[in-house]
Image (cartoon, rainbow, N blue to C red):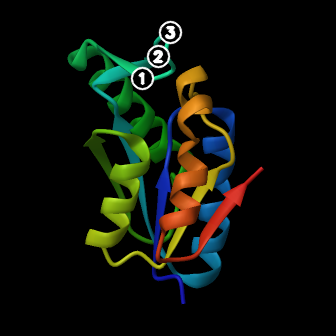
């Protein structure tokens, strides 16, 4: 039923809870788990008129953070009896998550209900909201 599960993480407490739920589901259904982290190469902040301003970030530093998060995820999945894959993607998180879902053979998406997003995410619409509206597979949102 859920042969492949995708779990996007950002280091938030909710993301780690989602990973635990994915593990539990995966163990019951014999699922492969892919844990992904999206590196956003820019910060967005609202300008005076409300439109987003894009501020470049230090790609190497945030990529290293992503690798560290994925290593932590692998540790949390230690002993998991089925295949585990990790991947880093670049771009806007909601778009990359939806693209990976469309490109892969995923049967379920498990994610936390809140991440580490700032005020720009609040103003422009949250990642979880966009993903749940547009995903073509079941999405489990963990609180």
Q: Is residue 60 left or right of residue 33?
A: left
The answer to whether mark 1 and mark 2 are in CB contact below 8 A is yes
Q: Quadrant of the N terminus?
A: bottom right
Residue underneath mark 1: 52
**For marks 1 and 2 on the same chain, the one whose residue lies earlier in the sequence:** 2
From the top left corner, tell me how far across and down residue 5 is, in percent.
Answer: 48, 69
Q: Which of the 4 quarters of the picture holds residue 105?
A: bottom left
From the top left corner, tell me how far across and down residue 77 is, in percent.
Answer: 53, 53
From the top left corner, tell me how far across and down residue 84 is, in percent.
Answer: 39, 61
Q: Where 55 falls versus 140 (above or below)?
A: above
Instruction: Decide: few, some or many residues near mark 2? Use Cα within 10 Å; few <14, some 14-19, many ≥20.
Output: some
Q: Where 41 falls versus 134 (above or below)?
A: above
Q: Nearer the viewer, residue 51 or 30?
A: 51
Residue underneath mark 3: 48
Q: Residue furthest front?
A: 49
Residue underneath mark 2: 45
The answer to whether mark 3 and mark 1 are in CB contact below 8 A is no
Please tell me whether mark 2 sits on a helix, a strand or a loop. Answer: strand
Instruction: Decide: few, some or many residues near mark 3? Use Cα within 10 Å; few <14, some 14-19, many ≥20.
Output: few
**Residue mark closest to the camera, 2 vs 3:** 3
Q: Nearer the viewer, residue 57 or 61?
A: 57
Q: Residue at x 48, y 69 (%)?
A: 135
Q: Residue furthest bottom?
A: 1
Please tell me whether mark 3 sits on a helix, a strand or a loop. Answer: loop
Q: Where 73 falls versus 48 (above or below)?
A: below
Q: Residue at x 45, y 72 (%)?
A: 82
Q: Residue at x 39, y 60 (%)?
A: 98
């Amino acid at each position: 039923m859920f042969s492949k599960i995708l779990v996007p993480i950002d280091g938030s407490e909710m993301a780690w809870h989602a990973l635990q739920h994915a593990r539990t589901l995966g163990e019951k259904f014999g699922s492969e788990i892919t844990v992904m982290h999206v590196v956003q190469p820019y910060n967005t902040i609202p300008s005076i008129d409300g439109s987003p301003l894009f501020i470049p970030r230090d790609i190497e530093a945030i990529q290293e953070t992503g690798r560290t998060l994925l290593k932590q995820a692998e540790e949390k999945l230690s002993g998991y009896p089925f295949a585990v894959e990790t991947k880093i993607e670049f771009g806007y998180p909601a778009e990359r998550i939806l693209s990976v879902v469309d490109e892969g053979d995923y049967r379920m998406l498990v994610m936390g209900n809140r991440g580490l997003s700032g005020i720009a995410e609040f103003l422009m619409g949250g990642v979880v909201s966009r993903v749940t509206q547009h995903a073509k597979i079941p999405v489990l949102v963990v609180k």
